[in-house]
Image (cartoon, rainbow, N blue to C red):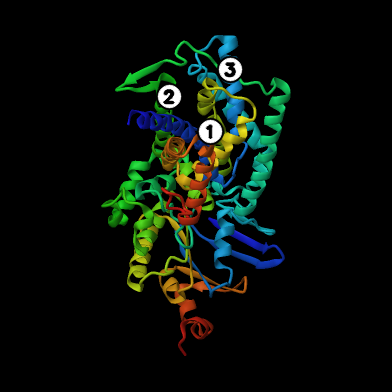
Amino acid sequence: MLEVKDVDVTYGDIQALWGVSFNVRKGEMVALVGSNGAGKSTVLRTLSGVQKPRKGTITVEGIRSDTVEPHKVVELGVSLVPEGRRLFRDMTILENLELGGYIGRARRVKAEHLEWVFQMFPVLKQRTHQLAGTLSGGEQQMLAIARGLMSDPKLLLVDELSLGLAPIIVKNIYNTLKEINKSRNVTILVVEQNVRLALEVGDRGYVIENGRITMEGSGKELLASEAIKSAYLAVG
Amino acid sequence: MAALLQILSYGVFSGALYGLVALGLSLVFGVMNYLNVAHGALIMLASYTVLWTCYYLRFDPFLSLILVVPVFFVIGWVLFLGLFQRLLALPETEKLKNSLLISFGILLICSNGATMLWTADERAVATSYTGKVIDLLGVRLPYIGLATVLLAIIVVLGVHLFLTRTYFGKAIRGVSQDYEAASWMGINTRRVCLASFAIGVALAGFPGVVIALQTFNPIVSFDLTNKALIVLILAGVGSLRGVLFGGLLLGVVEAASVFFVGVAYREVVGLLLFVLVLMFRPQGLGGRKA
């Protein structure tokens, strides 16, 4: 459903992505892993439309998404859970969720979606009128994911959710994501620095290094590969 | 005692006006980081529009708002598309500087243009209730002053309800808090900025009426922008809730200074307050945002 072909991205004179190609199939949970500065977040920024590629194409279910404005990308069914959460800190949990479901078709199913995300993240339900900025890190990450789901996306992009959170919380959130992926059939692309975790939950994975995709395979294959073990998992 | 209360009541009346003056400026600044110093000139133009509406159409000044506010909404719309839209892509600090330059140009053109076209003569709209007062325990409260306070409360409440109860209002707050994150929600941020700017300019209509009921001339533009900037700092940048409070504070402090120090120092006291707040509480008295 997502097809990225030969994408180059530059920031001024600095090239961040070099001929990046990958795809995500309907219903999959795919992990894009790599170390700090490899270009992971640039990939997601480009997919969300705030960064335009200099070369190459991105299509979502056959429709070009790289040439339209970011808010149009959301209408195509792509929703981003950004790095650092980027919540509307001075707004309540409920208002954050309402903005998540801002687009027309999401507004019509607001009540149903609210019920669904509260079921996924019950902790949010108890304090719908609390300001987002006053939540703990884990709760903020849950709210960010819930907000991303409110637009009724076909494809959810999740950027670096483990950042600054305790491992146990990260594990829980990943399990919830997996459940969302399986039970609601939302296709998910996660970008993650925590390579082991991401490849464990992902059906497939891509490894990005210095702005280039260098490896791909199923999560298990990649976890078992010698190159991954020595470079990212600190074993062997 | 009655004299002090009398002075303070005038402080509250002019404070409510200051709040109205700063509201549009504060909204635009909060949403897109444009410092529209032409706001005072737009209020001055609104006052002339009120004057003409009252003169030619025999409208009551307050009734003329149904015409003046939409007209200024359109003016804001055109100004944004023609001059301010292109700044949206700039980094935050560049937005501030460039919008300041453009709007300062508009301020000069409007105030000088108005002087050329309509002379620098003092104007005022006279109504049947001009100069009428209610006597409350020896304190004389002018009808127009009371109407200003009521208008300020209605307008601030209206803007507040719009921003907290409607999807579009929430989108405006979202854009003001995080422009990029708002676009990830499917919000057309350019359109939100356009509408906020137009609303900000439309809000110039309300103080425009109050000014028209006092005496005014084209040069009042500078004084109004000056007051709006002081209130913006007192309230805390981007804090709409603080605007009415900041306006009242400025009005009352000015009035008190007239009573205790003398009328010659009225303007100095406002600027002194401005400097003190910047020195000791730069986020504003009510603001949490840095």
Label 3: how many Cα within 10 Å (few below 14, some 14–19, many 20+): many
Q: Earlier in the sequence, mark 1 or mark 3?
A: 3
Disc 3 residue type (three-letter): Leu
Residue at the image point whose x is 66% and y is 58% from the top: A53
The answer to whether mark 1 and mark 2 are in CB contact below 8 A is no
Q: Which residue is mark 1?
A: B199
Q: On residue B145, which mark appears? A: 2
- Asked which quadrant contains residue B73, the reply is top right
Q: Is residue B21 above or below residue A166?
A: above
Q: Disc 2 vs disc 3: which is toward the camera?
A: 2
Q: Residues under labels 2 and 3: Cα distance? A: 18 Å
Residues at discs 2 and 3 both on one chain? yes
* Residue A207 percent location from the top left of the image: 55, 73
The amino acid type found where label 1 is placed reads Ile
Q: Amino acid at mark 2?
A: Gly
Which residue is identified by label 3?
B51
Going from N to C along the chain, the mark reached first, 1 or 2, is 2
Q: Secondary structure at mark 1?
A: helix
A3 or B206: nearer the eye?
B206
Disc 2 element: helix
